[in-house]
Amino acid sequence: MKFDIVTIFPRTIDAGLAEGVVSRGIASGVIDLQVHDLREFTVDRHRTVDDVPYGGGPGMVMKPEPLVKAVEKIRATRGAPDAVIVTSPQGRTFTQREAERLAGLGHVALLCGRYEGMDERVLSLVGAEELSIGDYVLSGGELPALIVVDAVSRLVPGVVGVGQSVEEDSFSRGLLDYPHYTRPSEFGGLKVPDVLLSGHHAEVRRWRKKEALARTLARRPELLAEAALDEEERALLDEIRKQGHS
Ligand code: SAH
């Protein structure tokens, strides 16, 4: 999986990728990620990437030329990306489904906005899609780009180790995850649920399924409408609803 990130703050991206599973994926070559400093695509002495907005008003706007040049360089040196993403609070919301879609592509480029955002023409000129990480406004697209890279990379085979399966994570099956416990079996006066100590694999599995369903029903009931439940899960959900489990 190839990523290219265009930013005026390359060190912010480097810092975000310095540790953890994604960084190991990069080190092992499963993830091929390059960071491009937008200022290298400027032509003036001051390496200007922003300018005043037409029509007046506060703030600055990212100039189109360096951004378009950066994407051209990526196309020429790294191959044409399957998706060019502009991080923007106005984009479609980034979800686990979006992460799965992007993980199915071979090459994704991400452009990080700053200031008031980019000159609108960039979007059509580079054929970009806009993605938002949520309904709030950040000062730049670097953290959103790191979030997208992280969520997508951990779905790429070989990034998250076997035995740390990503298939049971929240959202992967349209449900929230079940609760996790580790040693000691009693801590702060709280005990780990007996079933988890029982050694009954079938019961553990059923308990986890039920907890995942109960949590999803209590916290995010709208997810259940979209979730692909099997027969056992539908039966468990009926049981939970009857018990008024929360
Ligand atoms: N004036 C813009 C906000 C600019 S914030 C607006 O109201 O839509 C500066 C940059 O931060 C944006 O260009 C974008 O790249 C990034 N950014 C801010 N919030 C974001 C979010 N929720 N999701 C993705 N990117 C975001």
Image (spheres, grey):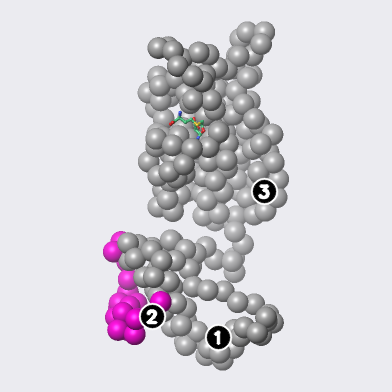
232, above or below 218, in the image: below
Residue under numbered circle 1: 193
Q: What kind of element bears circle 2? A: loop
In the rendered image, residue 213 lying in the magenta stretch gets the answer: no
Residue 201: x and y in percent read 51, 86
The quarter of the picture where the C terminus appears is bottom left
Q: Looking at the image, do the residues carrying marks 1 and 2 touch, with CB atoms under 8 Å apart? A: no
User: 211 or 39: which is nearer to us?
Assistant: 211
139, above or below 244, in the image: above
User: 121 or 56: which is nearer to us?
Assistant: 56
Residue under numbered circle 2: 245
Q: Residue at x 55, y 22 (%)?
A: 70
Q: Residue at x 60, y 45 (%)?
A: 31
Q: CA distance from mark 1 to mark 3?
A: 35 Å
Q: What kind of element bears circle 3? A: helix
Q: What kind of element bears circle 1? A: loop
**Residue numbers of the magenta segment:** 225-246
> Of discs 1 and 2, which sits in the foreground?
2
- If you read the primary sequence from the N terminus, does the residue marked by circle 3 or circle 2 appear first? 3
Residue 59: x and y in percent read 51, 20
The quarter of the picture where the N terminus appears is top right
Q: Check disc 3: other Cα within 10 Å, few if <14, some if 14-19, many if 20+.
A: some
Specify the quadrant of the image occupied by residue 239.
Answer: bottom left
